[in-house]
Amino acid sequence: MAKKASPSKKMVYYFGKTKTEGRGKSKALLGGKGLNLAEMTAIGLPVPPGFTITTEVCDGYYKNKQKLPAGLMDEIRKAVSVMEKELKKKFGDDANPLLVSVRSGAAVSMPGMMNTILNLGLNDEATEGLAKATNNPRFAYDAYRRLINMFGDVVMGMEHHTFEAAFDKIKKKYKVSEDTDVPAEGLKELCDAYKKVFEKHAGEPFPQDPYKQLQLAIEAVFGSWNTPRAVSYRQIENIRGLLGTAVNVQSMVYGNMGEDSGTGVAFTRNPNTGENKFFGEFLINAQGEDVVAGIRTPQPVAEMPKWNKAVHKQLLEIKQTLESHYKEMQDIEFTIEKGTLFMLQTRTGKRTGVAAVKIACDMVKEKLITQKEAVLRVPANDLTQLLLPSFKTTARNAADVLARGLPASPGAAVGKLSFTAADAKARAAEGEKVILVRKETSPEDVDGMHAAVGILTSTGGMTSHAAVVARGWGKCCVAGAGDVKINEKTKKITVNGRTFGAKDVLSLDGTTGEVMAGEVETQEPTLSGDFAKLMGWADQYRRLKVRTNADSPADSKRARDFGAEGIGLCRTEHMFFEGDRITHMRAMILAETEKDRRAALKKLLPFQRKDFEGIFKAMNGLPVTVRLLDPPLHEFLPHEDKAQKEMAQELGVKPSEVKQRTESLHESNPMLGHRGCRLSVTYPEILEMQVRAIVEAAIRCANKNIDAQPEIMIPLVGTAAELRVLRERVEAVIEEVVAQKKFEGKLNILIGTMIEIPRAALTADEVAEYADFFSFGTNDLTQMTFGYSRDDVNTFLPDYLDNDLLNVDPFQSLDTTGVGQLVEMGVTKGRSVKKKLKVGICGEHGGDPSSIDFCNQVGLDYVSCSPFRVPIARLAAAQAALNAEK
C-alpha cells in the first residue's frame, strides 16, 4: 500500500549548478522526468535549473481531500530562491523576471496524458519588464498570451476555442494568417483580449501573484493524474501501483525569441526502424507546445545544419553522451535560445517491435550492452509486430474508428462482411476477402473462421472460442465489441447509428481491438537477421521448453519454423468438422447402440490416423501431446431447424430424431457437464478409436523412419480413479494395436492428464500415480477457480478492472496468487510421488510473458502456446530465467 505523504519528509528536490539533490533517488519518488533531469544535470549537460516535487506529495494531495500538504509552499519558495541566485533573475520581477515551466512526470512515461504550463510567473508588470530585459516586446507578449491560454485551459478548465476566437480577430485585424506574423502591438492587444476571455469564463481576473499561479498550476498537474484520458491510458498500458505524478518546475528557456531560437523533439535512433540515425523534428522561433500540438509543420532535424550547424553538432554529441550513459535509445526535448542549446528532457524512447529488436542487437555490436541485457531489453509481446501484418501508421492514424472490442488475436484484417460460416467459406473460395461477423463463434463456424481474413464478435472474451482459434491460426480477431449490433437475418451490422452490410468493407486491428470503416492500408512483416539473432540468444538462456498448440500439419510446421519444440496441445475435436467427417461424427452421436456407434467411428478412424500421421511427420523427433475428445457432444450438432433438417436428410433419418437427440444432449451448464474424460467413461469406444488412430499413425511413421513421439492426454480428470480406469483402457488398446500390426519396434507413448479442475490439483499426488505427465489447462482451471465463464466475462470484467477489483483479465494473464497456487500445489504434490514427472501448461497463458515468468518460478518443464506466440514465449522464457538469476 502507498504510504501517506508526511510534512516531515523532504518534498522538493533541487537540480542545478548549485546542487543536484535527486541523483540516485528512484523513479517511484521523483518520476522518470525528474530523475532524468537530475541525472542529466549531474553529468554536465546544459539543463535549465529547477526542482521536482515528489510523487508522495501527489499521493498525499489525494488523501488530504485534494489539498497541498503543509510546508510544501515553504520548501518551494526556498528552491525558487536558489534558482533566482543561480540565474540572477527574480520570480515575478518587473525588471528581469524568472519564469518557469510546470510539468508532470510519473514513474512510467505517459506522454501527452497529463498537463503542462509554460511561462509561469508572468503578469502585466513582469511582461513589460521581460520586453525591456530582452529588448524583444513581441517575444514577451507572445509568452504572456501563451501563459494566459494554457493557464485558462489547464487550471480553469476553459475550452481552447474561446481563446482561438479572440486570436482570429487579431489576425484578421492585422491581415495575417500565421501566428508568427502578428506584430508586437497585435500580441499586446491579444493579451488584453485573452484576459477578458479569462475573466468572463473564470469569474475572476487572471492572477497577478506569481506564487498563486505556481500553487494553482501544481494543483492542476496533480489533478491531471486522474483525468479520464490519464486513467484510460494507465488501464490500457496496465500501469498500476504508482503513487501519482511528480511535478517538475524548471526555469524557462525560450525558443520563441526570434529566428536564432527554436525547439524540438528527437530520438537518438529511429523509433520505427531502429536505424542508428538521429531522428526528430524542430521548429524555428517556437515553444515546445507548437511541435506537440501540430500548430506548425516542423522540419526534420536532419535539415538543422542549414539553420545552425553548431547546435546540430552539439545535439549529436549529446546523443552519444546520453546513449553511453543510459545505454538505451533516448527520446529528448530541447530548446535553442538565441543560439544556445538547452536540454529539457530525456527518457527511454518508445519504439516499434522491429526497432526494439534492431536496437538491442546493434547495441550489443557496439558493446553498449551484453547479450543478456539485449534479451531483457525487448518486451516479449512486441515481437507480435514482427510476425503478423499490421496497418501502416499513417493510414491507421487517419482511419474512421467505429468501435473498440478486445484485442483477441493480433494482426490486421481488411474485408467485406460475412454473417455465416458457409457464406464466408463460399466467398473466400471465390477469392473474396471476408471478415466473419458473429455474435459469438462455435466449433460449427470453424470452416468460416478459417476462410475469413479476420473475425469480429460482439460478445466473448480473450479466451473465447473465436479468440483461441484465431490466435492458433495467427488470424486477426476482435472479440466482445459490444457496440456492434449484428443482425444475421438482414445481413447487416449497426454501430452507433451507422449501418453496414455484406458489400461493405471493415478493417480490424487485432492488436488494439479497433474496428474501422473502409479499407485501411496494411503492410507485411519482414523478419530480419536480427530477429533470428535475438531468438538464438534467448534460446541460450532459457530453461523452459516451448511447445505449441496445433491441430493440423500446417500449423505444426508453422510452429516448428518459429522454434516450437513439440506440441503441448493437439485438440482432436477440431479434426471432426471438415468435409465428410462431421457427417460420420453426427451419425455416431445419433446412434442408439454401441454397434452403430462403432460403425460410425470406424469411418472416422482413417481421417484421424491421417491427421496424426501428418502432425507426427511435421514434428519428427519432437513430442506431440494429443488430447482425447473434450467438448460435449451437443457442440457437434446443429441447433437451428433448417440445419437439423439438412442433417436428417443427409443421414437418412427423420428430422424429429435429430431434434430429439439434440434436446436430450442439451445441458444447463455444459462446462460442468458430460464432457472430457466423462465421455470416455460413458462411450469408451470413442477413446478406443482415437487411441487406435494415434498408435497406428505412430507405427506407420516408425516404418518410414519418422520419429513419432505421441503423448496421450486424458482431459478433465477430477479423481485418480478416473485416470486409473481410462489409463488401463488406453494401455489395452496400445497393446492390441501393436499386436495386430505385428510391430516389433519401440513405442514410448506417455499417458497423462490435463489438470483443469481444482480437485485434480488438490489431489495431484493421488492423480500422479497414474500419470506420466501433467499439463495444466489454465483456461478452464481459471474458469472453475473464479467461477467466471470465459465466454461471458466481458459483461462485467471492464467494471472490475476500472474499479481495481482485478488488476488484469485473469484469462489473459495467470492469476498467480489464486489459480497459480493450484498450479504450484499440483507440481509439488505430483512430483512428491514421481520426482521426474513432466509438467507443462497448455492454456492460453502459455504465451503470456508474466504467466511464463510464474511457470519458470514453479519449475514447469515447458509452456505451450499458439504457433504465432512461440517466439514471444521463447523470449519471455529467457527473460524469466535471467530475472531469476538476479
Image (cartoon, rainbow, N blue to C red):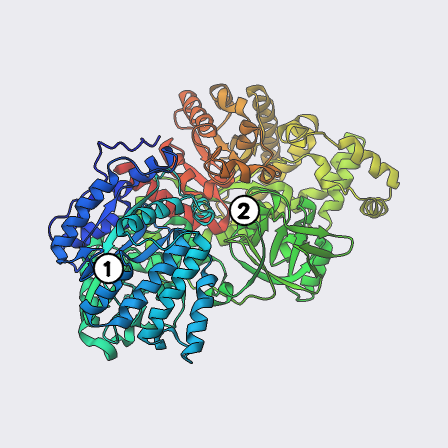
Please, is residue 204 above or below residue 66 in the view?
Answer: below
Q: Earlier in the sequence, mark 2 or mark 1?
A: 1
Q: How many marks?
A: 2
Residue assigned mark 2: 550
- Viewer-proximal residue among 528 and 407: 407
* Residue 279 shows in this picture: no
* Residue 390 shows in this picture: yes
Q: Position of residue 21 (x, y in %)?
A: 16, 44
Give the spatial CA distance, label 2 vs label 1.
59 Å
Q: Position of residue 208 (x, y in %)?
A: 30, 54
Quadrant of the frame with the C terminus: top left
- Viewer-proximal residue among 599 and 759: 759
The label on residue 223 is: none
- Viewer-proximal residue among 768 and 523: 523
Considering the numbered disc 1 on the image, is that residue within a helix, a strand or a loop? loop
Considering the numbered disc 2 on the image, is that residue within a helix, a strand or a loop? loop
Tag 2: amino acid:
Ala
- Viewer-proximal residue among 747 and 631: 631
Q: Is residue 80 left or right of residue 180?
A: left
Q: Position of residue 33 (x, y in %)?
A: 27, 51
Residue assigned mark 1: 252
Q: Position of residue 596 (x, y in %)?
A: 79, 35
The image quarter in which residue 453 lies: bottom right
Tag 1: amino acid:
Met
